Image (spheres, grey):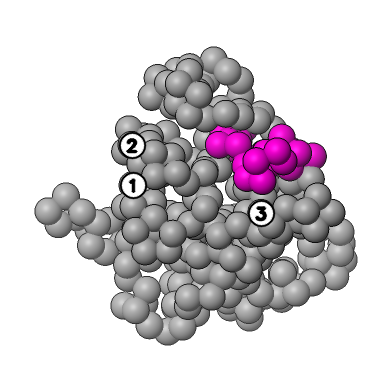
Amino acid sequence: MKIIDDILRYFPNKIYQIFSNLFQENIKLIDEVQEIRMRANRPIILKLRERDLMLQYNIQQSEILQIVERICENSIYAYKNQICEGFVTVQGGHRIGITGSCVIENGKIINVKYISSLNFRIAREILNCSTRILREVIDVENKTIFNTIIVAPPGKGKTTVLRDLIRRLSNGIDEINFRGKVCGVVDERGEIAAMYKGVPQNDVGIRTDIIENVDKYKGIHMLIRTMAPEIVACDEIGSKEDVEAIHYALFSGVKGIFTMHGRNIDDIKNNRQIYELIENREIQKVIFL
């Protein structure tokens, strides 16, 4: 129940009571909820594992603003940079997507006015979910890892598996005599470690350094220059700049674990730059979830 309570505390009393009654009547829903979507003057929709559940309550824009103010601890200005990136991460690692009317200056978003939609993405850690692929990632003979890309469509657990891999590689695995490695995570959108006021809300291991809210190219360079990681990890690679950063890491002698969207090898081939990493044996393992 605590995971849901972390979210419900941001809701106005009327909406809080609707949710409280709902979960009391059907406690199993708590484990099924993945997202809570709110759109001004539209019904609240819960995204469950296998279906959507629509509540018979049209949320008003004034209520959405109340929620945003609570998320931002009554100081929207202090969270302005996060809002301009389209999301705010709150205690517990939950991430709230935000949309509305963007104010553009010099080609950059400097504010989001008239916020109209919120998407609460509920963070759930699944410890040891990487067990099945761990043996494919670890290079036992050389006491290190294979440079690896994890591939799956959206919503199939790439980030969850990546997070657990980082945790286990960082902590070390006594049963196979694998010493813990210094890991550097570029958490571009705050989904891996889910930092809240500088503290990771998700367990990413005892030897892991995190840099967030920065693109992968800058983040990987900064980590290698300042924290000397043995392994770097980041989520959802795809751009030319991402691949250049991976080249830099691998040529610096750092191992890497990455994820990307895709269903099969053809999807990888469609991204010529990433496929070249595989052809050149810079990426040694490709794992499809």
> Where residue 256 sits in the image (x, y, percent)?
52, 43
Residue that numbered label 2 is attached to: 244
Residue 256 in magenta?
A: no
Q: Are marks 3 and 2 in contact (CB under 8 Å)?
A: no
Instruction: Answer with mark 1 or mark 2, whichever residue precedes in sequence.
Output: 1
**Res 32 seen here:** no
Q: Residue furthest front?
A: 142
Location of residue 16 (image quadrant): bottom right
The part of the chain drawn in magenta is: 132-158
- Position of 253 with respect to 192 (left or right) is left
Element marked by disc 2? helix
Q: CA distance from mark 3 to mark 2?
A: 24 Å
Q: Which quadrant would the N terminus be assigned to in this image?
A: bottom right
Q: Which quadrant would the C terminus be assigned to in this image?
A: top right
Element marked by disc 1? helix
| Amino acid at pointer 2 | Glu
The residue drawn where x is 54% and y is 15% is 266
Neighbour class for label 2 at 10 Å: few (<14), some, many (≥20)? Answer: some
> Where residue 282 sits in the image (x, y, percent)?
48, 29
> Where residue 234 sits in the image (x, y, percent)?
49, 48
Neighbour class for label 1 at 10 Å: few (<14), some, many (≥20)? Answer: some
Mark 1 vs mark 3, foreground winner is: 3
Instruction: Answer with mark 1 or mark 3, whichever residue precedes in sequence.
Output: 3
Element marked by disc 3? helix
Rendered image: mark on residue 173: none
Does 183 appear above or below 133?
below
Residue sitting nearer the eye, 96 or 68:
96
The residue drawn where x is 34% and y is 79% is 78
Residue that numbered label 3 is attached to: 169
| Amino acid at pointer 1 | Tyr
Rendered image: mark on residue 217: 1
